[in-house]
Amino acid sequence: MQRFLLALAVSLFAPFAPAQETAPDVLVKSVSQEVLEIIRKDKDIQSGNTKKTIDLVETKVLPHFDFARMTALAMGPNWRRATPEQQKVLTDQFRTLLVRTYSTALSSYKNHTIDFKPLRSQPGDTDVIVRSEVKQPGQQAVSIDYSMEKTAANWKVYDVAVGGVSLVTTYRDTFTNEVRQGGIDGLIKSLGDKNRQLETAEKK
Amino acid sequence: MIRCLAALAAAVLLASGCATTGGAPDPRDPWEGTNRAIFEFNDGLDRALIKPTAEAYRFVTPQIVRTGVTNFFGNLQDIWIGTNQLLQGKVELWINDWARVLFNTTFGLGGVLDIASEMRLEKHDEDFGQTLAVWGAPFGPYVVLPIFGPSSARDAAGFAVDFYMYPTFWILRNARPEHWVSWRNSLAGLAFVNGRANALGVTDVLEQAALDRYAYVRSAFFQRRLNQIYDGNPPSAPLSGAPAIPTKAAAELLEILDALDRERAAAGGPVARETFEPRVPMNYDAVLAAARPVQIVAKAGKPNRQDH
């Protein structure tokens, strides 16, 4: 009987053993919990230490995002009209802006809890949505959906939708306008100005 | 006060109504010049008066008081939210929402405690604009309302009905006539300031995130509304269904992303996939099916195709 159970256990876990990668929902869940845990314990972050929050985001959250893809999606057809150098600058600037915004949002998280919905997907899926809900006392839960795709490295997030509002779609509307008004360089300038402005505001 | 503000808004409109913005018009926003003027007006009013009031309110009240206030108004609104569920044919959600009112009003001490959520009767978000959408009304042009902000022709009509049905108005309609106007105004003012205080976090992030706040808010408005109309499960994923990518451009986008992959492969980096297209993620049907709390929701009317 014991041997049978052992065999059963092995047969159950064997298919998972060789796979090094983490399932997308498990990945998002563990990263979120780790980050929230750090925020809860860190008084500096809670009291608005931007640099510390940005460091946290850079080390824990960023490795799981695919910024080149996010930027390409936010640019839409204009992406191809940009030279490789422009694409690189755009990606860097967009990344800086998102990290800063995300850090601001994070530092206000104190007594929030996150519920994850079970991932509904087939084993072969390479592009999935991971759904979660942020609950805070006295307010309606806000949904946060991560669009993720499987890359050679691991699962990477390429869009986040908060309450149904997709980051990529929202920026695409603005980027299209900016490019139409001032070309690719105009958009690069706007992004650069915005980032500098935020940096100065922070130093004050 | 409101009349004075409306006059001010009208003056701003006259002054800058014909201002052109230089950008290509968004087909959803034919009145962009006027809308931008009202947006600027609202923004100025918010910076000068509403936001400081909300911040002061947040500063002087402990979280538990604000939660109580939010719950109290939320409970009053649940009556109208439930009615809208019924108008949209979602009978079980109507029962859920009215049961919330029943429990919160009694055991929740007049609505100050949200006992119902702890009993797993979830809070929902409905209004008459959503009901009109379920009945088949399209968005119509984008409209920025003075003071109340982003809306659409349909949702502004819905908002007028919501406003009339707003519980602080109709509950107090039968109160003692000599006092009820000031009571109503104080309550409405508290509801407004409390609502603004709840949104402070969101607007702080918006302030940082947006290059052009007007365009950012407009885009977010359409996505958010579509999400609300479909109770959190719009028929297509944000990336594929949004009007921002017409089908022709989607094909172009696919090429772009292929090129990105080829570049990465050449540089020796990881290749995401052979192709990428903005499309519904593979598990979306399963996600949708799992998200439907009750069968009747699936059968309830769907907004017509013009919406997306």
Image (cartoon, helix red, strand yellow):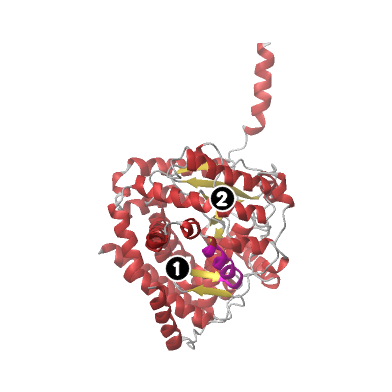
Q: Which residue does the numbered mark 1 point to in the structure image?
A: B210
Quarter of the C terminus of chain B within the rendering: bottom right
* Residue type, label 2: His
Please name the residue that numbered disc 2 is placed on.
Answer: B124
Residue A83 shown left or right of residue A100 in the figure: right
In the image, B59 versus B78, the foreground residue is: B78
Q: Position of residue B264 (x, y in %)?
A: 58, 60
**Is residue A14 placed above or below A82 in the rendered structure?**
above
Find the magenta span and give its range.
B152-164
Secondary structure at badge 1 equals loop
- Whether B238 is drawn above or below B70: the answer is below
- Depth check, front residue: B171 or B123: B171
Task: Tell me the kind of residue under disc 1.
Answer: Ala
Question: Which of B58 and A7 lies nearest the eye of the viewer?
Answer: B58
Task: State the image coordinates of residue A86 (x, y, percent, origin top left).
Answer: 49, 72
Measuring from the top left, give residue B58's x and y in whole percent. Answer: 32, 55
Q: Chain of mark 2?
A: B
The quarter of the rendered structure image containing the N terminus of chain B is bottom left
Residue drawn at 53 percent across, 77 percent down:
A177
Residue B231 visible here: no
Q: Nearer the viewer, mark 1 or mark 2?
A: 2
Image disc number at residue A33: none
